[in-house]
Image (tube, helix red, strand yellow):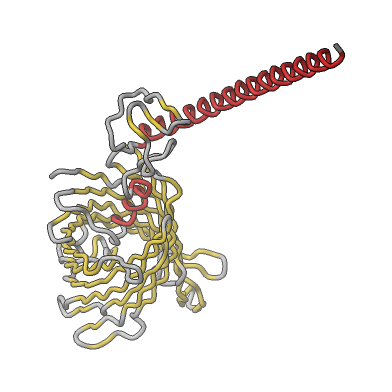
Amino acid sequence: MQSRGLRSGLVALALALCTGGAQAQDARAQELERNLKERDKVIAELLDRVEALERRVGVRRPAADTGKAPERDFASGTEGNRTVGPERAPGAVMVEEGAAERALERSLTRAGALLLPPGVLEFEPSFTYARHEDAAPRFVESAGVVFAGETKRNTDSITADLALRMGLPRDSQLELGFPYQWRKVDSVTSVGFSPTGSSSQTGSGLGDLRVGLATTLLREGLWSPDLVGRITWDTDTGGRDDNGVSLGGGFHELGASLTATKRQDPVAFVGGLSYEHTFEKVQIRPGPTISANFGSFIALSPETSLSFRFVGAYQKETEFFGRKVGGSDRTLGILLVGGSTLLARGTLLNLSAGIGLTDDADDFSITLSLPIRFSGM
Protein backbone atom coordinates (compact mmCIF):
# COMPACT_ATOMS: atom_id res chain seq x y z
CA MET A 1 0.00 0.00 0.00
CA GLN A 2 2.76 2.44 0.81
CA SER A 3 4.45 1.66 -2.48
CA ARG A 4 1.18 2.22 -4.36
CA GLY A 5 0.64 5.55 -2.58
CA LEU A 6 4.16 6.67 -3.37
CA ARG A 7 3.66 5.91 -7.07
CA SER A 8 0.39 7.83 -7.07
CA GLY A 9 2.10 10.85 -5.47
CA LEU A 10 4.89 10.81 -8.02
CA VAL A 11 2.42 10.63 -10.90
CA ALA A 12 0.42 13.56 -9.47
CA LEU A 13 3.60 15.60 -9.04
CA ALA A 14 4.67 14.87 -12.62
CA LEU A 15 1.25 15.89 -13.94
CA ALA A 16 1.41 19.13 -11.96
CA LEU A 17 4.87 19.94 -13.29
CA CYS A 18 3.82 19.25 -16.87
CA THR A 19 0.71 21.36 -16.49
CA GLY A 20 2.69 24.24 -14.96
CA GLY A 21 5.34 24.00 -17.69
CA ALA A 22 2.70 24.04 -20.40
CA GLN A 23 1.02 27.05 -18.82
CA ALA A 24 4.36 28.86 -18.57
CA GLN A 25 5.11 28.10 -22.24
CA ASP A 26 1.67 29.37 -23.21
CA ALA A 27 2.29 32.59 -21.25
CA ARG A 28 5.67 33.07 -22.92
CA ALA A 29 4.17 32.43 -26.35
CA GLN A 30 1.41 34.95 -25.68
CA GLU A 31 3.94 37.53 -24.48
CA LEU A 32 6.11 36.92 -27.58
CA GLU A 33 3.07 37.27 -29.83
CA ARG A 34 2.17 40.57 -28.15
CA ASN A 35 5.73 41.84 -28.62
CA LEU A 36 5.66 40.87 -32.32
CA LYS A 37 2.37 42.67 -32.81
CA GLU A 38 3.75 45.79 -31.10
CA ARG A 39 6.86 45.64 -33.32
CA ASP A 40 4.76 45.21 -36.46
CA LYS A 41 2.61 48.16 -35.43
CA VAL A 42 5.66 50.40 -34.91
CA ILE A 43 7.20 49.35 -38.25
CA ALA A 44 3.90 49.92 -40.06
CA GLU A 45 3.67 53.42 -38.58
CA LEU A 46 7.24 54.17 -39.67
CA LEU A 47 6.51 52.95 -43.19
CA ASP A 48 3.41 55.13 -43.36
CA ARG A 49 5.55 58.12 -42.36
CA VAL A 50 8.13 57.24 -45.04
CA GLU A 51 5.40 56.97 -47.68
CA ALA A 52 3.98 60.34 -46.62
CA LEU A 53 7.46 61.88 -46.87
CA GLU A 54 7.94 60.31 -50.32
CA ARG A 55 4.69 61.83 -51.52
CA ARG A 56 5.72 65.22 -50.14
CA VAL A 57 9.14 65.31 -51.86
CA GLY A 58 7.98 63.52 -55.01
CA VAL A 59 10.07 60.33 -54.76
CA ARG A 60 8.75 57.66 -57.09
CA ARG A 61 8.45 54.02 -56.07
CA PRO A 62 9.05 51.17 -58.51
CA ALA A 63 5.44 50.03 -58.20
CA ALA A 64 2.23 52.05 -58.33
CA ASP A 65 1.21 53.49 -54.99
CA THR A 66 -2.46 52.80 -54.21
CA GLY A 67 -2.45 55.19 -51.27
CA LYS A 68 -2.84 52.30 -48.80
CA ALA A 69 0.06 50.30 -47.46
CA PRO A 70 -0.34 46.55 -48.22
CA GLU A 71 -0.61 44.14 -45.35
CA ARG A 72 2.78 43.03 -44.18
CA ASP A 73 3.74 39.89 -42.35
CA PHE A 74 7.14 40.76 -40.92
CA ALA A 75 7.60 37.44 -39.22
CA SER A 76 7.28 35.43 -42.45
CA GLY A 77 8.96 38.04 -44.65
CA THR A 78 6.03 38.54 -47.04
CA GLU A 79 4.24 41.65 -48.22
CA GLY A 80 0.74 40.98 -49.48
CA ASN A 81 1.13 38.01 -51.85
CA ARG A 82 4.75 38.87 -52.64
CA THR A 83 7.80 37.63 -50.80
CA VAL A 84 10.13 40.37 -49.68
CA GLY A 85 13.52 39.45 -51.07
CA PRO A 86 16.98 40.76 -50.18
CA GLU A 87 16.64 43.64 -52.68
CA ARG A 88 13.77 45.11 -50.69
CA ALA A 89 13.69 44.16 -47.05
CA PRO A 90 10.80 45.25 -44.82
CA GLY A 91 10.99 49.00 -44.31
CA ALA A 92 13.37 49.59 -47.22
CA VAL A 93 12.65 52.61 -49.45
CA MET A 94 13.40 52.43 -53.16
CA VAL A 95 14.73 55.93 -53.95
CA GLU A 96 15.34 57.02 -57.52
CA GLU A 97 19.05 57.47 -58.20
CA GLY A 98 20.11 61.08 -57.71
CA ALA A 99 16.80 62.10 -56.11
CA ALA A 100 18.49 62.78 -52.77
CA GLU A 101 20.66 65.44 -54.41
CA ARG A 102 18.12 67.13 -56.65
CA ALA A 103 18.67 70.57 -55.14
CA LEU A 104 22.42 69.91 -55.21
CA GLU A 105 22.35 68.92 -58.88
CA ARG A 106 20.24 71.95 -59.78
CA SER A 107 22.81 74.17 -58.04
CA LEU A 108 25.65 72.47 -59.92
CA THR A 109 23.81 73.09 -63.21
CA ARG A 110 23.38 76.75 -62.33
CA ALA A 111 27.11 77.01 -61.57
CA GLY A 112 28.02 75.46 -64.92
CA ALA A 113 29.47 72.27 -63.43
CA LEU A 114 26.67 70.00 -64.65
CA LEU A 115 24.83 70.06 -68.01
CA LEU A 116 21.15 69.58 -68.77
CA PRO A 117 19.88 66.36 -70.39
CA PRO A 118 18.90 66.63 -74.08
CA GLY A 119 15.56 68.35 -74.62
CA VAL A 120 15.46 70.02 -71.19
CA LEU A 121 15.10 73.81 -71.09
CA GLU A 122 15.88 76.07 -68.15
CA PHE A 123 15.15 79.78 -67.69
CA GLU A 124 16.87 81.72 -64.91
CA PRO A 125 15.83 85.30 -64.14
CA SER A 126 18.22 86.85 -61.62
CA PHE A 127 18.83 90.17 -59.87
CA THR A 128 22.16 91.28 -58.42
CA TYR A 129 22.85 94.28 -56.22
CA ALA A 130 26.49 95.31 -55.72
CA ARG A 131 28.19 98.06 -53.71
CA HIS A 132 31.66 99.35 -54.41
CA GLU A 133 33.42 102.05 -52.38
CA ASP A 134 36.83 103.53 -53.11
CA ALA A 135 38.77 106.69 -52.34
CA ALA A 136 41.57 108.62 -54.01
CA PRO A 137 43.67 111.60 -52.88
CA ARG A 138 42.94 114.95 -54.49
CA PHE A 139 44.23 118.53 -54.21
CA VAL A 140 41.56 121.13 -53.55
CA GLU A 141 42.10 124.87 -54.09
CA SER A 142 40.19 127.33 -51.92
CA ALA A 143 40.85 131.11 -51.74
CA GLY A 144 44.15 130.64 -53.53
CA VAL A 145 45.30 128.01 -51.04
CA VAL A 146 45.82 124.39 -52.09
CA PHE A 147 44.73 121.70 -49.63
CA ALA A 148 45.28 117.97 -49.69
CA GLY A 149 41.87 116.30 -49.80
CA GLU A 150 40.21 113.05 -50.70
CA THR A 151 37.47 112.03 -53.11
CA LYS A 152 35.23 109.13 -52.12
CA ARG A 153 33.25 107.41 -54.82
CA ASN A 154 30.38 105.06 -53.96
CA THR A 155 28.87 102.97 -56.73
CA ASP A 156 25.56 101.14 -56.45
CA SER A 157 24.68 98.81 -59.30
CA ILE A 158 21.73 96.57 -60.08
CA THR A 159 21.93 93.95 -62.81
CA ALA A 160 18.87 92.10 -64.11
CA ASP A 161 19.77 89.05 -66.16
CA LEU A 162 17.77 86.42 -68.03
CA ALA A 163 19.77 83.27 -68.69
CA LEU A 164 18.62 80.42 -70.90
CA ARG A 165 20.09 76.92 -70.97
CA MET A 166 19.01 74.10 -73.28
CA GLY A 167 20.28 70.52 -73.23
CA LEU A 168 21.57 69.22 -76.55
CA PRO A 169 22.55 65.74 -77.77
CA ARG A 170 26.08 64.41 -77.23
CA ASP A 171 26.26 65.80 -73.67
CA SER A 172 26.19 69.42 -74.85
CA GLN A 173 24.34 72.54 -73.80
CA LEU A 174 23.44 75.85 -75.43
CA GLU A 175 23.61 78.95 -73.21
CA LEU A 176 22.27 82.48 -73.72
CA GLY A 177 22.30 85.56 -71.49
CA PHE A 178 20.41 88.89 -71.72
CA PRO A 179 21.57 91.42 -69.07
CA TYR A 180 20.37 94.91 -68.21
CA GLN A 181 22.37 97.25 -65.93
CA TRP A 182 21.63 100.27 -63.79
CA ARG A 183 24.34 102.20 -61.94
CA LYS A 184 24.50 105.20 -59.65
CA VAL A 185 27.80 106.89 -58.78
CA ASP A 186 28.03 109.35 -55.86
CA SER A 187 31.26 111.31 -55.41
CA VAL A 188 32.15 113.42 -52.37
CA THR A 189 35.33 115.50 -52.07
CA SER A 190 36.47 116.35 -48.54
CA VAL A 191 39.27 118.26 -46.88
CA GLY A 192 39.80 116.82 -43.45
CA PHE A 193 36.28 115.94 -42.31
CA SER A 194 34.59 118.79 -44.19
CA PRO A 195 32.94 118.06 -47.57
CA THR A 196 33.80 120.65 -50.20
CA GLY A 197 31.82 119.27 -53.14
CA SER A 198 29.68 116.38 -54.30
CA SER A 199 28.13 114.96 -57.46
CA SER A 200 25.72 112.17 -58.39
CA GLN A 201 25.33 110.45 -61.75
CA THR A 202 23.04 107.67 -62.90
CA GLY A 203 23.30 105.51 -66.00
CA SER A 204 21.58 102.43 -67.37
CA GLY A 205 21.39 100.31 -70.49
CA LEU A 206 21.41 96.86 -72.01
CA GLY A 207 24.40 94.70 -71.32
CA ASP A 208 26.31 92.48 -73.74
CA LEU A 209 24.40 89.51 -75.13
CA ARG A 210 26.16 86.24 -74.23
CA VAL A 211 26.19 83.09 -76.36
CA GLY A 212 27.88 79.92 -75.12
CA LEU A 213 28.29 76.24 -75.91
CA ALA A 214 29.31 73.70 -73.27
CA THR A 215 30.08 69.99 -73.53
CA THR A 216 31.10 67.19 -71.18
CA LEU A 217 34.66 66.18 -71.97
CA LEU A 218 35.17 63.55 -69.29
CA ARG A 219 32.87 61.51 -67.06
CA GLU A 220 33.66 61.05 -63.39
CA GLY A 221 35.47 57.85 -62.51
CA LEU A 222 37.15 56.38 -59.46
CA TRP A 223 39.97 58.95 -59.61
CA SER A 224 38.95 61.23 -62.49
CA PRO A 225 36.46 64.12 -62.13
CA ASP A 226 33.59 65.23 -64.31
CA LEU A 227 35.07 67.74 -66.77
CA VAL A 228 33.01 70.34 -68.66
CA GLY A 229 34.47 72.52 -71.41
CA ARG A 230 32.82 75.79 -72.40
CA ILE A 231 33.28 78.49 -75.06
CA THR A 232 31.50 81.82 -74.58
CA TRP A 233 31.13 84.79 -76.90
CA ASP A 234 30.28 88.05 -75.16
CA THR A 235 29.00 90.38 -77.90
CA ASP A 236 29.32 94.17 -78.09
CA THR A 237 25.57 94.86 -78.01
CA GLY A 238 25.78 96.65 -74.65
CA GLY A 239 26.79 100.23 -74.00
CA ARG A 240 30.17 101.33 -72.66
CA ASP A 241 28.76 104.27 -70.73
CA ASP A 242 25.59 106.30 -70.17
CA ASN A 243 25.37 109.82 -68.79
CA GLY A 244 29.05 109.69 -67.88
CA VAL A 245 28.67 106.42 -65.95
CA SER A 246 30.72 103.44 -67.15
CA LEU A 247 28.63 100.33 -67.82
CA GLY A 248 31.57 98.08 -68.70
CA GLY A 249 30.16 96.71 -71.97
CA GLY A 250 30.45 97.33 -75.68
CA PHE A 251 33.41 95.03 -76.46
CA HIS A 252 33.56 91.66 -78.19
CA GLU A 253 35.01 89.08 -75.81
CA LEU A 254 35.78 85.40 -76.40
CA GLY A 255 36.30 83.11 -73.44
CA ALA A 256 37.13 79.45 -72.81
CA SER A 257 36.87 77.56 -69.52
CA LEU A 258 37.24 74.13 -67.93
CA THR A 259 35.18 73.09 -64.91
CA ALA A 260 35.95 69.94 -62.90
CA THR A 261 33.57 68.28 -60.41
CA LYS A 262 34.33 65.47 -57.98
CA ARG A 263 31.53 64.12 -55.83
CA GLN A 264 31.70 62.52 -52.40
CA ASP A 265 28.00 62.52 -51.56
CA PRO A 266 26.53 64.59 -50.08
CA VAL A 267 29.41 66.95 -51.03
CA ALA A 268 30.52 68.00 -54.51
CA PHE A 269 33.89 69.72 -54.97
CA VAL A 270 34.10 72.10 -57.95
CA GLY A 271 37.07 73.92 -59.47
CA GLY A 272 37.65 75.75 -62.72
CA LEU A 273 40.01 77.79 -64.89
CA SER A 274 39.10 80.31 -67.59
CA TYR A 275 40.68 82.72 -70.04
CA GLU A 276 38.93 85.65 -71.74
CA HIS A 277 40.27 87.75 -74.61
CA THR A 278 38.84 91.19 -75.38
CA PHE A 279 38.99 92.53 -78.94
CA GLU A 280 40.01 96.08 -79.73
CA LYS A 281 37.38 98.74 -80.41
CA VAL A 282 37.81 102.49 -81.07
CA GLN A 283 41.54 102.14 -80.33
CA ILE A 284 40.80 100.72 -76.86
CA ARG A 285 41.50 97.12 -75.85
CA PRO A 286 40.97 95.99 -72.24
CA GLY A 287 43.53 93.44 -71.13
CA PRO A 288 42.83 89.68 -71.15
CA THR A 289 41.50 88.10 -67.97
CA ILE A 290 42.69 84.90 -66.33
CA SER A 291 40.52 83.52 -63.52
CA ALA A 292 40.20 80.51 -61.26
CA ASN A 293 37.59 79.30 -58.82
CA PHE A 294 37.15 76.45 -56.37
CA GLY A 295 34.68 75.49 -53.69
CA SER A 296 32.13 72.96 -52.52
CA PHE A 297 28.40 72.32 -52.74
CA ILE A 298 26.73 70.48 -49.86
CA ALA A 299 23.32 68.77 -49.89
CA LEU A 300 21.58 69.35 -46.56
CA SER A 301 18.42 67.53 -47.68
CA PRO A 302 16.76 66.51 -50.96
CA GLU A 303 15.34 70.03 -51.17
CA THR A 304 18.18 72.23 -49.88
CA SER A 305 21.87 72.75 -50.57
CA LEU A 306 24.63 75.19 -49.59
CA SER A 307 27.65 76.42 -51.52
CA PHE A 308 30.98 77.98 -50.57
CA ARG A 309 33.28 79.22 -53.33
CA PHE A 310 36.28 81.44 -53.91
CA VAL A 311 36.72 83.29 -57.22
CA GLY A 312 39.98 84.97 -58.17
CA ALA A 313 40.81 86.85 -61.39
CA TYR A 314 43.57 88.97 -62.84
CA GLN A 315 43.08 91.38 -65.75
CA LYS A 316 46.11 92.81 -67.51
CA GLU A 317 46.59 96.46 -68.43
CA THR A 318 44.31 98.21 -70.89
CA GLU A 319 45.82 99.33 -74.19
CA PHE A 320 44.96 102.80 -75.50
CA PHE A 321 46.07 103.56 -79.05
CA GLY A 322 48.41 100.57 -78.89
CA ARG A 323 50.10 101.62 -75.64
CA LYS A 324 49.52 100.04 -72.24
CA VAL A 325 48.08 102.27 -69.55
CA GLY A 326 50.13 101.84 -66.39
CA GLY A 327 48.18 100.89 -63.28
CA SER A 328 45.08 99.82 -65.23
CA ASP A 329 45.47 96.13 -64.34
CA ARG A 330 43.02 94.68 -61.80
CA THR A 331 43.07 91.87 -59.26
CA LEU A 332 39.75 90.46 -58.06
CA GLY A 333 39.11 88.17 -55.13
CA ILE A 334 35.57 87.25 -54.08
CA LEU A 335 34.18 84.83 -51.48
CA LEU A 336 30.72 83.53 -52.43
CA VAL A 337 28.31 81.91 -49.95
CA GLY A 338 24.93 80.72 -51.16
CA GLY A 339 21.96 78.48 -50.56
CA SER A 340 19.34 76.88 -52.79
CA THR A 341 15.97 75.31 -52.07
CA LEU A 342 13.29 73.70 -54.20
CA LEU A 343 10.07 75.71 -54.16
CA ALA A 344 8.10 73.40 -56.46
CA ARG A 345 8.67 70.80 -59.12
CA GLY A 346 11.11 72.34 -61.59
CA THR A 347 11.55 75.60 -59.65
CA LEU A 348 14.64 76.41 -57.59
CA LEU A 349 15.27 79.47 -55.45
CA ASN A 350 18.89 80.54 -55.08
CA LEU A 351 20.28 83.28 -52.84
CA SER A 352 23.99 84.07 -52.65
CA ALA A 353 26.18 86.76 -51.17
CA GLY A 354 29.61 87.86 -52.36
CA ILE A 355 32.29 89.47 -50.18
CA GLY A 356 35.08 91.36 -51.90
CA LEU A 357 38.58 90.45 -50.72
CA THR A 358 40.53 92.95 -52.86
CA ASP A 359 40.22 96.68 -53.53
CA ASP A 360 39.23 96.13 -57.17
CA ALA A 361 36.34 93.79 -56.28
CA ASP A 362 32.89 94.95 -55.15
CA ASP A 363 32.73 95.32 -51.39
CA PHE A 364 29.69 93.07 -51.27
CA SER A 365 26.95 91.79 -53.55
CA ILE A 366 23.66 89.91 -53.22
CA THR A 367 22.16 87.75 -55.98
CA LEU A 368 18.64 86.33 -56.10
CA SER A 369 17.76 83.94 -58.91
CA LEU A 370 14.91 81.60 -59.81
CA PRO A 371 15.90 78.82 -62.25
CA ILE A 372 12.77 77.26 -63.79
CA ARG A 373 13.11 73.97 -65.64
CA PHE A 374 10.91 72.58 -68.42
CA SER A 375 11.28 68.94 -69.49
CA GLY A 376 10.34 67.19 -72.68
CA MET A 377 10.98 70.09 -75.02
Where residue 339 appears, as percent x and y from the top left, is 42, 51
Q: Nearer the viewer, residue 370 or 364?
A: 370
State the residue lying farthest toward the bottom.
323
Q: How many marks?
A: 0
Residue positioned 33% across, 74% down in the render: 291
Query: Residue 375: image x %, image y %?
Result: 18, 44
Residue visible at 48% across and 27% down? Answer: 45
* Direction right: furthest residue: 2
Which quadrant does the N terminus fall into?
Answer: top right
- The relative height of residue 39 versus residue 273 in the rendered view (above or below) is above
Q: Quadrant of residue 85?
A: top left
Regarding residue 353, the answer to whether it shows in the image is no
Q: Quadrant of the C terminus?
A: top left
Q: From the viewer's perspective, is 6 left or right of 59?
A: right
Nearest the viewer among 3 and 212 is: 3
In the rendered view, tell whether residue 74 sits above or below residue 89: above
Residue drawn 76% across the image and 14% down it: 12
Q: Residue 13 in the image: state x and y as whole percent.
A: 77, 18
**Residue 177 x, y percent position in the rendering:** 20, 57
Work out whether residue 53 or residue 362 is closer to the camera in this orientation and state it: 53
Whether residue 372 sits left or right of residue 86 in the image: it is: left
